[in-house]
Image (spheres, helix red, strand yellow):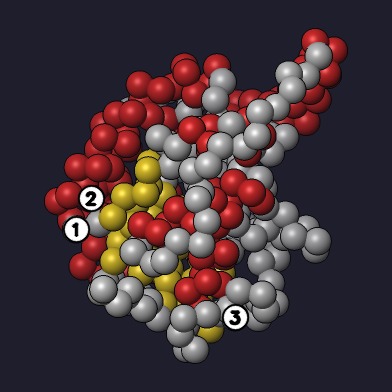
Amino acid sequence: MQTPVTYTSFVAIGDSFTEGMSDALPDGSYRGWADVLAGRLAARHPDFRYANLAVRGKLIRQISEDQVDAAAAMGADLVTLVGGLNDVLRPKCDVDEVCAQLESSVRRLAPSCRQLVLMRSPARRGPVATRFAPRMEQLFDFVEDLARRHGALVVDLYGAEALGDPRMWADDRLHLTAEGHARVAEAVWQRLGLPAESDWTVPLPPAERAGWVARRTSDVRFTRTHLLPWIGRRLTGRSSGDGRPAKRPDLLPYPSSGAAPETAASDA
């Protein structure tokens, strides 16, 4: 049997998905799949280092301009790039331009690391995913093509029914819960050829359908708390990530799973 590859360093780049929203820690910061994966990789190598340059709300052009070259300069063994979904979920989007920005990013990243990982991002089942499915699938088909041409791995989260379950998503309906992030970490772990620790694709137990009043109450709360502020930011050209620094900007030692991180993800 072939011995699994040991990764000594990991850089994650992207938007809120990679930042870890909404996998909240007691201090109000976010953990997320990349932190979980880093902790597990750290357990395999005593000198493991990790950086996370992701910032919530970023579009693919911003990721390409602000994060890609910095990540490439770090020379990490493993790099993950997930971006473009914020673009395709906007009413006006040039998907071809999104793909061009993604290709530019991959061209710079792939030679800088031992292994580049791309993703077909997960989508919550519902009207939003249905409306934007053609754009998302165009983007994800391009991701598959990029991976073939540049020797990258693709983690297919979009095709995983379990991650489409609304119970895997936080109240904002845009970000995964802690359970969802844990499954993404396991999916990447297995795609890297590391020994499985769980079946990340297993569906949740059947759920009882909430009553009409409960559903409408949830919809009203979602609209007031999350949807209207999101619309307001779009109308004024603002982003939730404006002025926010990278989550973990330097490639530094990281503790193995179960230990407290040396650098808290404050402001994440």
Quick one: 21 or 214, which is closer to the camera?
A: 214
Could you say which disc has been placed on residue 151 in the image? 1
For the residue carrying disc 2, how many other residues have a C-alpha within 10 Å: few (<14), some (14-19), or many (20+)? Answer: some
Instruction: Say which quarter of the image contains residue 10.
Output: bottom left
Residue 207, how many percent across, how many down? 70, 27
* Viewer can see residue 31: yes
Query: Which quadrant is home to the N terminus?
Result: bottom left
Measure the alpha-carbon separation of dots 3 and 2.
30 Å
In the visual, does 144 lie left or right of 255?
A: left
Residue 87, how many percent across, how many down? 43, 34
In the visual, does 211 lie left or right of 71?
A: right
Measure the alpha-carbon separation of dots 2 and 1.
6 Å
Which residue: 50% across, 50% down? 199
Dot placed on the residue nearer the N-terminal end, 3 or 2: 2
Q: Measured along the vertical axis of the image, is residue 205 above or below residue 189?
A: above
Instruction: Say which quarter of the image contains residue 194.
Output: bottom left
